[in-house]
Image: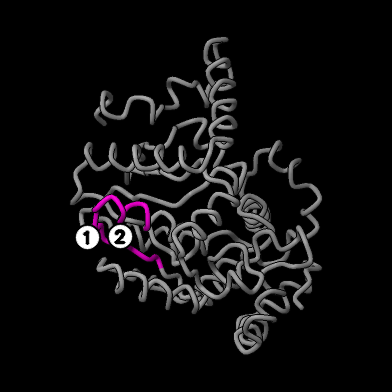
Amino acid sequence: MTECSLSGFSLNDEKTGWNDPNKTEEQRALLRSRGNLLNKRMRYSLDYKIILAKTRINAAIMTYGVNNCYVSFSGGKDSAVLSHLILSMGYKLEHVFSNTRLEYPDCVRFAHEWCRKKGAKLTMVLPDIMPYEVWKRYGYPMFSKEIANILERVRTHKTVNPKKLKRVKNFLKYKDVKISERCCYYLKKKPIMEWQKRSNKKVAIMGVRAEESRVRRTVWVRKGCIYETKDQVVVHPIIFLTEKDVWDYVKRFKIRLPNIYYNGVKRNGCYCCGFGCHLNDENNFVKLKKLNPKLWENVMNHWGFAKVCKQCGVKTE
């Protein structure tokens, strides 16, 4: 990484001491200040956040080269805003849709139409295994990635950190249910990593926002907007945007989103994902029943979610 051109956009875990239980007071102060800075930037005006986003996009492209960058494009509202930003800057980057085969049909259609109208190349990346095969072999995605991972480890008699066990103690009663987080890897992460190797494009510009989860906030505090992993370079230009910012941007630039966003769905992604299913009655299964009863019937009865949801006490309609 070219430190001078990305100064202020990225950090590393050595500097923050994130994984060190014996952090120095300086490192603790740095982490506290980073958290405060994130909160401050999320309160900025949309106009200023747009400037920040464009600055980070330019920094990544100038550092790594335009031919090494691509837009991670899901056909959802956040990636639509990201794409609009990038295209408005004159960059016709390849748009790559990691299609798990479980995407809302509206979002797939939107992705094709958007890229066709904007003159951007759209690449659909598909997994080499069907979703049902992953669930049958490893287990179903329920509750959260962390909970599913721990329950699978307990079920398969693998070692689990006692602290993690304590965090999910209320879910251990489901330890014999076939639950796993592995579909995320086999249906999304693995296919896109293989595509990156084939294409030699390893700079992924993503529409990730800190407001969406504690994990995403933590990643920014640790690493910033642009950082390198073993396999890729990750760029999060719209990390500071709130839900309101996204809708204000959509309204300002008259972007017509996929229909699901006007019918009660707040986030796209896999339509039958069980992560978060326990947090409220309007989970993905209930929403899918209202949006597409035929697809819901297939998910429940042919793919086995009805049985798993019943075992976990999760509402499905």
Where's the C terminus, which quadrant? Answer: bottom right
- Check the image and tell me how it is coloured: one colour
* Residue lying at 28% horizontally and 50% vertically, measured from the top left: 89
* Residue lying at 48% horizontally and 21% vertically, measured from the top left: 16
How far is the residue under mark 2 from the one under mark 1? 6 Å
Magenta stretch bounds:
84-98
Residue 215 is labelled as: none
Mark 1 Cα-neighbour bin, 10 Å: few <14, some 14–19, many ≥20: few
Residue furthest bottom in the image: 294
Query: Is residue 174 or residue 232 the one in the foreground?
Result: 232
Amino acid at pointer 1: Arg
90 drawn magenta: yes
Query: Is residue 38 or residue 223 the one in the foreground?
Result: 38
- For label 1, the residue is 198
300 versus 257 height, above or below: below
Image spot of residue 3 (x, y percent): 28, 25
103 drawn magenta: no
Image spot of residue 147 (x, y percent): 67, 52
Mark 2 Cα-neighbour bin, 10 Å: few <14, some 14–19, many ≥20: few
Left/right of residue 129 with respect to residue 62 in the rendered view: right
Where's the N terminus, which quadrant? Answer: top left
- For label 2, the residue is 194
Residue furthest top in the image: 25
198 versus 238 height, above or below: below
Q: Secondary structure at mark 2?
A: helix
Q: Secondary structure at mark 1?
A: helix
* Residue lying at 62% horizontally and 41% vertically, measured from the top left: 214
Marks 2 & 1, CB-CB < 8 Å contact: yes
Amino acid at pointer 2: Glu
